[in-house]
Image (spheres, helix red, strand yellow):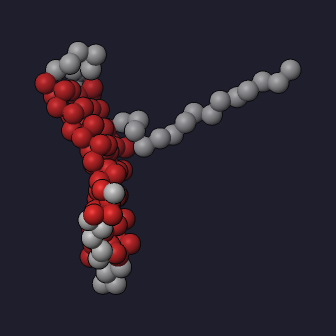
Amino acid sequence: QLQLQLQPQVSMCYSFTASILTGSFAYSAVICCLLRNANYGRDIWNAIWIFFLGSMQWYDAYIWYLHDSGEDLKTCSFNNWLVTRMALTTIMLEPLGQLVGYMIGKKQWLGYKIVC
């Protein structure tokens, strides 16, 4: 008989502290990409992408803060509503951030080609 053992999964979204550390690490990487002397186009592109990913960690940290302070996340309080809308907006703008990062990195504005 085959028995499946599940390993506990470690993720970056399991506590307030983990979210703060991950968000700080992501924003540190953004600063490093932007301050490099080489000024490669990919660095700027990656900085914009990592900024969006790091922002999600800060929203997650705020949700953990609300949870740890005793707020019931099943109810839609103003804080819960606000951070959820901010996270959704960030997710929706991520493709646009990638496009802008590409254009800045390549120093090439696509303009009409994107629409058509």
- The spot of residue 103 in percent (x, y) is 30, 69
Residue furthest to the front: 116
Front residue of this view, candidates 31 and 50: 50
Closer-to-camera residue (88/72): 88
**x%, y% of residue 20?**
30, 46
**Location of residue 105 with respect to 5 vertically, above or below:** below
Q: Quadrant of residue 76?
A: top left
- Which residue is pictured at 23% across the width and 15% down the height? 75
Identify the residue shown where x is 34% and y is 75%: 106
Outermost residue on the left side: it is 78
Kindly tell me whether residue 103 is visible in this rendering. Answer: yes
Q: Quadrant of residue 25?
A: bottom left
In the picture, which quadrant includes the C terminus? bottom left
Q: Residue 17 in the image: state x and y as whole percent.
A: 33, 42
| Residue at the farthest bottom position | 38
Q: Is residue 58 above or below residue 46?
A: above
The picture quadrant where one finds residue 1 is top right
Residue at 29%, 76% in the rendered image: 107
Residue 65 in the image: above or below residue 43: above
11 with respect to 52 (left or right): right
At 29% from the left and 43% from the top, the residue drawn is 92
Nearer to me, 28 or 98: 98
Can the viewer see residue 32 in this picture? no
Residue 33 is situated, as x and y percent measured from the top left of the image, at 32, 71
The residue closer to the viewer here, 28 or 107, is 107
